[in-house]
Image (cartoon, grey):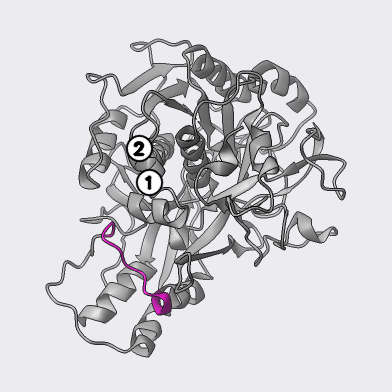
Amino acid sequence: MRTPTPTTPHIRGRWRRVGSAAAAATALLLAGLGTAAHADAATPTATKTVSAQAVAAQVAKAHVHYANACDATPKKGYASCHALRVTSGTTAFQEEQAAKKGLAPRTISPKASSASPTGYGPSDLRSAYGLASAASSNGSGETIAIVDAYDDPNAEADLATYRSHYGLSDCTTDNGCFKKVSQTGSTTSLPTADSGWAGEISLDLDMASAVCPNCNILLVEAKSSSMANLGTAVNEAVKLGAKFVSNSYGGSESSSDTSYDSSYFNHPGVAITVSAGDEAYGAEYPAGSKYVTAVGGTALKTSSNSRGWTESVWKTSSTEGTGSGCSAYDAKPSWQTDTGCTKRMIADVSAVADPATGVSVYDTYGSDGTGWNTYGGTSASAPIIAGVYALAGTPGSSDHPASYPYAAAGTSALNDVTSGNNGTCATSYFCTAKSGYDGPTGWGTPEGTDAFTG
């Protein structure tokens, strides 16, 4: 993504093994992963008494492969989506359930749907980020806009299946909760459909729903993955009244970025979230815009601690993990005060993104539309944070909401992520987690909504 290579704006799938999955899975199981939000893919009928050591030994075998959903190497001026779809292997959750019930674990096969979810669901995310109460009572009347490229013809139907499975209220065109438009605002003249971006769209819609089930959702589809068209879609989302706009895409930085800032992303009173990238250490755009909240990625695991969860920087390999870094072009916003980077530093906050601890998504369009899938990437974390902003309420009309987490820095409103790295860098905090601010996770992950309101 950061090395622009001419290509067509279609899927460029890449197989990857999550090398850290075994270690992560062991920690998950020893901590007791498994909530009502999960459904066992093997659908066994009984739970056996199995030692934690035996469970951990089986979970250590967990491994998955995943693919970039779309435009893996976009040409200059274009963006790749940041959705990573698990295509094969066994997840930690599947291994855990199999060990506890004395069964051989089911596996995820390429292009084959799972009968039920194999990743985190809404109750997991709300538990992890202290959002259960807010998700129940907040969000009515607020609109989260999802900006992506190309059309997903099954978007509304797939969203209905996700929400029904998890007991969320209907969100449809008929009841006014859901609306799909092109970058010009048309509801009938939509872009060309694309299987890879459809998966991204489903991921974004499902995560917004999981975190803010009472929110309305506006899907704005750009006619291509060029920054000009995606930026035009952002402007259309704001024009149509959205106060929360999620963007799960990015590409190489360029000298054009500052003009994109003023043309597309400078919207006071609107919380605009952008994923930080999936290729490990290095800055991308539009996460580098000084007007947006850049969202990094973590590995999220259950724990016996008081929170019930632990997080570390998401890194699968030297080229696979959350993005971060010092922008080459964008000026530093006034609220950002780290001293190692004289320009805009990425990221601001973070949320779950590791495919090994990924989220469940329902998608049925095209060659990638296989029903229930597990997804990761910072494409998951950006709409999660957009949902948190929406739960926190409408931003002040003259505010840049990217500043809000900085006002709450160091408080209990954020879970400080202090372990892990996403690569090698000359200035340690650019790529390595530490107490307080760091590049890969920013000021940390949400603990309730207090860090996301003015």
> Percent x, y for residue 266?
67, 21
Secondary-structure class at tag 1: helix
In the image, the segment drawn in magenta is: 29-38
Residue 356 among magenta residues: no
Q: Which residue is mark 2?
A: 137
Secondary-structure class at tag 2: helix
Mark 2 is on which residue type? Ser
> Percent x, y for residue 249?
56, 37
Mark 2 vs mark 1, CA separation in Å: 6 Å
> Percent x, y for residue 5?
66, 38
Mark 1 is on which residue type? Ser
Q: Nearer the viewer, residue 20 or 75?
A: 20
Position of residue 421 in the picture relative to residue 60 (left or right):
right
| Quadrant of image for the C terminus | top right
Q: Which residue is mark 1?
A: 133
Position of residue 223 in the picture relative to residue 271 (left or right):
left
User: Which of the 4 image quadrants contains residue 335?
Assistant: top right
Is the residue under label 1 in contact with that under label 2 (CB below 8 Å)? yes
Q: Is residue 171 above or below residue 180?
A: below
Q: Nearer the viewer, residue 220 or 163?
A: 163
| Quadrant of image for the N terminus | top right
User: In terms of secondary structure, what is the magenta stretch mainly?
Assistant: loop
